[in-house]
Amino acid sequence: MSIIRIPTPLRQYAGGNASIDVNGGTVGEALGDLTTQYPDLRNHLYDGDQLRSFVNIYLNQEDIRYLDGADTALQGNETLLIVPSIAGG
């Protein structure tokens, strides 16, 4: 089981939780479990079947885009961070 840390702006779609335990052998499966538990999160994380371009996922402080993306294997007891990009002027 791994943990996904939820950023403050998205907690309202995750029952107010700062972190959620998820199951899955890959990052994609873990995110799938997260959005099954909290379906309202899906629209904020995904555009169709792809992660939104402004949603960054980190596995143990490494951006999954530089690993194997959603296919990155999880060993269990790992921490995933959702970090939405923030823009403004």
Image: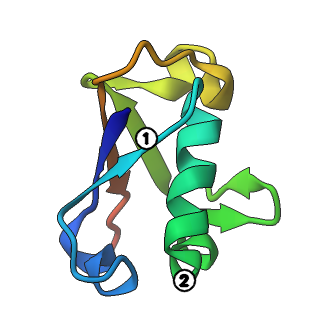
Q: Which of 14 and 44 is in front in this view?
A: 14
Expressed as whole percent of the image width and height from the top left, the position of residue 51 reads 65, 53
For the point 40% across and 83% down, the residue is 13
Q: In this view, does 77 lie above or below 48?
A: above
User: In the depicted view, which residue is nearer to us: 66 or 2?
Assistant: 2
Q: Is mark 1 on a helix, strand or loop?
A: strand
Q: What residue type is labelled 2?
A: Asp
Say which of 26 and 8 sits in front: 26
* Dot 2 or dot 1, earlier in sequence: 2
Residue 36 visible at all = yes
Identified at 28% across, 61% down, the residue is 6
- Residue 9 appears in which quarter of the rendering? bottom left
| Marker disc for residue 57 | 1
Cβ atoms under marks 2 and 1 closer than 8 Å: no
Compared across the picture, whether 73 is left or right of 20 comes to right
Q: Nearer the viewer, mark 2 or mark 1?
A: 2
Report, in whole angstroms, how far the alpha carbon at label 2 lies from the one at label 1: 18 Å
Q: Which quadrant: the N terminus? A: top left
- Residue at figure coordinates x 56%, y 15% from the top left: 73
Q: Where is residue 79 in the image (x, y as percent from the top left)?
A: 27, 32
48 w.r.t. 81: above or below: below
Is the residue 74 above or below the residue 51 in the image? above
Picture coordinates of residue 75, whole percent (x, y): 42, 12
Residue named by callout 2: 40
